[in-house]
Image (spheres, rainbow, N blue to C red):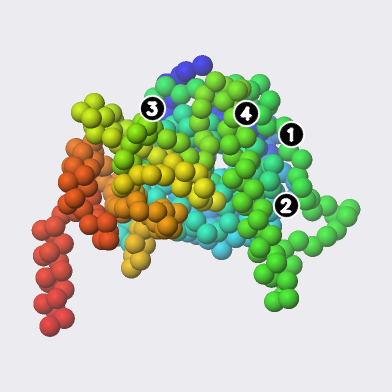
Amino acid sequence: MLRQLEGSRAVAETVARCRPQVIAAYPISPQTHIVEALSDLVRTGELEPCEYLMVESEFGALSACIGASAAGSRTYTATASQGLLFMAEALPNASGLGLPVVMTVANRAIGAPINIWNDHSDAMSQRDAGWVQLFAESNQEAVDLHVQAFVLAERLSLPVMVCMDGFVLTHAVEEIDVPDQEVVDSLLPPFSPRQVLDPAAPVTIGAMVGPEAFTEVKYLAAAQQLRVLDEVPVIAEAFEQATGRSSGGLVSSYRMEEATIAVLAMGSVLGSVKDVVDELRDVGVPIGVVAVSCYRPWPLDEVRAALAGLEQVVVLNRAFAVGSGTMLGQDVRLTLATSATRVHDVVAGLGGRPVTRASIRSLLAAVIGGEVDPDRLHFLDLDQDVVARELGLALAKES
């Protein structure tokens, strides 16, 4: 049933219907409303049995989830920005131990300077920590992905991040359908952990591994994560059959019929991109959209198929790596390394700067007109005067 809900509240209700047994939480904007709502559901008895742990830090939150998961409990946490970075030491522990922890990342910029608004810098900084990363385009998809994340995590015994744009989604109030308890229960069976720490049958997990076996351990972990690429479409199909909604999956295409150019992106910016593509299609421009929902593991074959035969692809990145370009763009370039498709790497919307339809239209007009160099990183809406002035000051000081 559709209801007017804040995105965070809808996610909290959905997580509650997944019946987590342990929630460890530490507040940080813009994810705080999620764990606040969950604490209320635990307090009122609407979510039970569930142990709600108020910890001293984000590192403590994930560490508590690791312990609870290893002891056989379905676990959940949420964070953002520097909070995710504070978890960095524990993130590979969860994945290395194969623990099915589910975490919401309310994507937010990382400092310095301090910025509490949305981009993808936080999740991208931890893209190689061994966690599955799913990106939501809308609040409805964020809700749907959380159910699928618990199913995926427990089916493969892997940790999963559901990434949703901070403030843009988390604080937006709109019509959202939270799946009924019966629907969630039909998709997500009671938790049956693959490994359990039991005092009656003591074992050691995560013990030291020497050079003679470490490579094999890592290889097997990578092979296990690649199974995600087979399972995600199956889980998405089951969800669609249960709810009538198509969401999640690995990659989706929009208006790609007879397209010669495409925009590839992740997250809420896709809504604005699709609006612009509709306008351009109306005037005969052969352009479409490719949305990546599963970023890690990278769905190479699916992305390659979605972009096959294109003359140009514009990759909209909500983060970049200082000194080396962009993460999403580099993945696309590697995917298309043997093709003639020109890849335009564009950084947009850092620190919450709006990615407007007008800016997207101008960008695409420049790309189509041959005014954007595919060999150079392009920054959308960059204030050239400010940059030139500051660079001039820096050069003057050096001389």
Residue labelled with disc 2: 70
Crowding at mark 4 (Cα within 10 Å: few <14, some 14-19, many 20+): some
Of pointers 2 and 1, the one earlier in the residue sequence: 2
Residue labelled with disc 4: 238
SS class, disc 4 = helix
State how far apart marks 2 and 4 are (Cα). Answer: 28 Å
State which quadrant residue 233 falls in: top right
Which of discs 2 and 4 lies nearer the camera? The answer is 4
Q: Nearer the viewer, residue 219 or 187?
A: 219
State how far apart marks 2 and 1 are (Cα). Answer: 16 Å
The quadrant in which the C terminus is found is bottom left
Of pointers 2 and 4, the one earlier in the residue sequence: 2
Residue labelled with disc 1: 190
Residue 245 at x, y percent in the picture? 52, 24
Location of residue 98 with respect to 232 vertically, above or below: below
State how far apart marks 4 and 1 are (Cα). Answer: 17 Å
Residue 12 at x, y percent in the picture? 53, 33
State how far apart marks 4 and 3 are (Cα). Answer: 27 Å
Residue labelled with disc 3: 173
Q: Nearer the viewer, residue 280 or 121?
A: 280
Of pointers 4 and 3, the one earlier in the residue sequence: 3
Crowding at mark 3 (Cα within 10 Å: few <14, some 14-19, many 20+): some
State how far apart marks 3 and 1 are (Cα). Answer: 31 Å
SS class, disc 1 = loop
SS class, disc 2 = helix
Of pointers 2 and 3, the one earlier in the residue sequence: 2
Q: Amino acid at mark 1?
A: Pro
Residue 227 at x, y percent in the picture? 64, 48
Residue 171 at x, y percent in the picture? 38, 34
State which quadrant residue 383 falls in: bottom left
Q: Amino acid at mark 4?
A: Ala
